[in-house]
Image (tube, grey):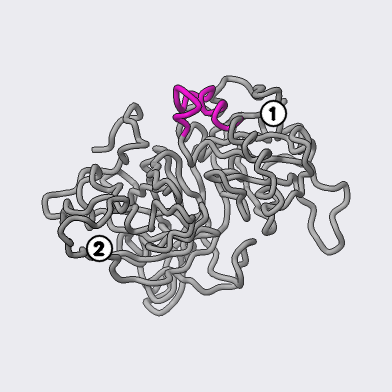
Amino acid sequence: MVASRSTPIKDQPRMGTPTATQRVYSTTTSTTTPSSTKPQPQHPIPATYYRGGTSRAPILHLSSLPSPSLWAPLFRTILGSPDPFGRQLNGLGGGISSLSKLCVVGPSERMGVDVDFTFVQMGIRDGGVDYRGSCGNMTAGVAAFAVDEGLVCLPPAGKDGEGEGEGEEGGGEATVRIYNTNTDKLIEATVPLIAGEAAAMGDFAISGVPGTGACIKLAFLDPAGSVTGKLLPTGRGTDVFDGVEATCIDASNPCVFIAAESMGVPGTISPAEMSAHPDLLARLESIRCQAAVKMGMCSTPEDTPAGVPKISLVSPPPPSPPAGEERVGIIVRAVSTGDPHGAVPISVGVSVAAAAGVEGSVVARVMGERGGEGCVVAHPSGRMVVDARFEGGRLERAVVFRTARRIMKGWVYV
């Protein structure tokens, strides 16, 4: 069973309860306790390490885990949190928000769905385990994992045509329907195949990742209201916090958008420059927490989840693009779990596309005539294209393209 929307999902994931055959690692406790008790043996858990888009995370089988109530200390140990030095040296985390993640995947019992996916955002320094919101980038990794682990039926071998294979050693593609338990939303992924596995090599490049890979298409279906249940959680296209106008929107993940000029900074400010201005980050965090209350995500600013809502500065591009560069629709500088993001989360890109269709929103005013179904978002590492499909004024789906790669498979010890 999946818990209802009223479940306090910050403390408990909404993944189905494991069966009695699953191993229970009940002796594992928080890594914050000094080793003054009798030493305990380590326990291996099967894990696969994937890059998905511009993120990276271990992916675990649901069947390898104990009851969800015991997940938090396991996940802290796996990723190496809490770490007061911010490095996650004792685990698989990478010391930044896009590398401090974990995914749990299992076969789905829902009609027409292949796998259920629960996303975990881990606090680096405080060890907070947050199940609110999802990760669009790692969804690409989850899609590849589902294929590689045999969790999805592959198309028949020896047939040609869209969505069908070309033989055991050939190519073709598989469609993976993913249910995200954090947001109650569906994602349809199209994964290229090679020799019956997800293809990793290809000629598609994404900003923020060196080299090229096989292109994975992600279609986020009906992404509005992922956490709050509404596209505009406050009921308005704009709100004011600390005298600053903001747009609060929920599409794929709850997000808050502020014009960079309203904060007195250029829209092209770099992540390093943002990090060098703690007062700016503190103001953004204050606005984010106030917005979370207004969006109905928590009762007080102090209770705001670390991962969502995500907050971003937006600004218009220059009238003419630099020589050799394509025109973009909007410049975005995102902040994730308190740190400036080196690229842009997919969920922020989806929310930008959705907000562009909201008359009077901060995003719509910044984009002007550059909005529409093909939204090109500029970020510190390059650009992201979000193909937004509207139907009757409703965001019917948002499509992005990513790459993913299986890095290693083995056991992680807890």
Instruction: Establish if 113 lies above or below 240.
Output: below
Q: Marks 1 and 2, Cα distance to the nearest angstrom?
A: 46 Å
Q: How many numbered marks appear?
A: 2
Q: Residue at x 32, y 56 (%)?
A: 77
- Furthest toward the front, the residue is 36
- Name the residue tied to disc 1: 361
Is residue 190 visible in the rendered structure shown here? no
Q: Quadrant of the N terminus?
A: top left
* 283 in relation to 96, above or below: above
In magenta, the rendered stretch is 287-304
Q: Residue at x 52, y 25 (%)?
A: 295
Please tell me whether residue 275 belongs to the stretch shown in magenta: no
User: What's the magenta bit mostly, secondary-structure-wise?
Assistant: helix
In which quarter of the view is residue 209 placed?
A: bottom right
Rendered location of residue 141, percent (x, y): 44, 60
Q: Which mark is residue 278?
A: none
Helix, strand, or loop for circle 2?
strand
State the image quarter where residue 193 is shown: bottom left
Residue 45: mark: 2
Q: Residue at the spot x=48%, y=61% of the render?
A: 94
Q: Secondary structure at mark 1?
A: loop
- What percent of the width, then of the height, locates residue 107? 28, 53
Residue type (three-letter) at the residue carrying disc 1: Ser
Q: Nearer the viewer, residue 277 or 210?
A: 277
